[in-house]
Amino acid sequence: MDPNQPLENSDEQAQDSFIQRAIKAGQSQPPNEPPIEPMSPIQTGSRVSPVPGYNTSPVRPEDPEPVRQPVKPTVPRRPSRPATTPRPDPTPTEEIDQAASVEEQATQALERLRQKMAVVAEEFAQGKINRAQFHAIYQRYQEQRQITEMLLKRDPQTGAWQSVMRPGHTGFLRNYYEAKVESFAIYHLALQKAIIVTGSVQLPLQQVAPLLTKLRAIVHERGFANLARRKLQDERWVVFVPGLYTVAVVVFSLEPSPTQLQQIEDMQRDFERANSQALVENRIRPRELVYPHRALFEK
């Protein structure tokens, strides 16, 4: 070392030499590490990845099959409520004031009985019941009224009238005297032949044939014929319900009510409407027809 050279120059040369070595070391790559690829520019709308070295987060590959919705368990249907039996009309003893005296209770029961008699008369006027039902039920109410009034006349404080007003007989009489269908048949007016005959009681064809001839003439002349009914010798009734092509012959156990007659007329009309094509073409195959009248036997 030259003693005449300043010390600070030697220090600067050493510092420069150290910096140059550091720069060269930073520029050189390790032999085993691959060079870092330059980062590609970030596209607009891409998501920046939190992982160093990636501009956007990796895209999740699509499933080869479409996404299936989870199967929801089938909720069992709630069982339907059982049909409730309609409550019958209140009896004369159900609408009386129990806090009233015995005589007042009897008076209220008699008034309720008079109202029920009026209801029966209205039912007959509306065609809901037949004559046999009306007479049986009305007579039952009349007997209850007479016996109750007789007991109260003897002893106004007696409670014996309550046993007379007990319910149960009226419903039995209503059902017993209701006209029930025992059989029905359908005849073709033009062919004068039976299409279907069913039931326990039937009229012989020789009795039906004259009426079929008459009804066919009426329908041909007027375009229609009205319902006809006739009482038989054994309390049964037979009803003839003509249409345009056929006539229904229905046998009842008793006299049918107007409501029942209307029901038969509606069924006969529906029979011809449902089978109109076969009836017009006289292409009668009984097994291929439909019969609304079957509902009469399925009650």
Image: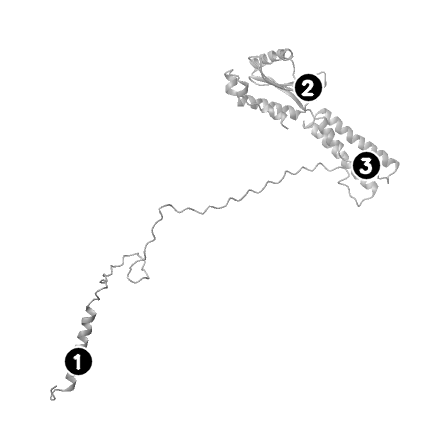
Residue sitting at 58 percent across and 24 percent down? Answer: 292
Can you say whether 152 is above or below 49 in the image?
A: above
Q: Position of residue 143 (x, y in %)?
A: 80, 30
User: Which mark is first along the chain, 3 or 2?
Assistant: 3
For label 2, the residue is: 237
Left of 69 or right of it: where is 193? right
For label 1, the residue is: 14
Residue sitting at 64 percent across and 23 percent down? Answer: 261
Left of 214 or right of it: where is 49? left
Q: Residue furthest bottom?
A: 3
Q: Position of residue 220 (x, y in %)?
A: 56, 13
**Residue at mark 1 to residue at mark 3: CA–CA distance:** 137 Å
**Residue at mark 2 to residue at mark 1: CA–CA distance:** 141 Å
Q: Which residue is more in the foreground, 71 or 48?
A: 71
- Labelled disc at residue 163: 3
Q: Which residue is more in the foreground, 181 or 215?
A: 181
What's the amino acid at mark 2?
Trp
User: Which mark is first along the chain, 1 or 2?
Assistant: 1
Pair 2/1: label in front? 1
Residue sitting at 83 percent across and 41 percent down? Answer: 103
**Residue at mark 2 to residue at mark 3: CA–CA distance:** 37 Å
Instruction: State the image quarter where residue 246 is shown.
Output: top right
Colour basis: one colour
Work out which quarter of the rendered image holds the C terminus and state it.
Answer: top right
Can you say whether 190 is above or below 257 in the image?
A: above
Instruction: State the image quarter where residue 131 is shown.
Output: top right
Pair 1/3: label in front? 1
What's the amino acid at mark 3?
Ser
Q: Under tag 1, what secondary structure? A: helix
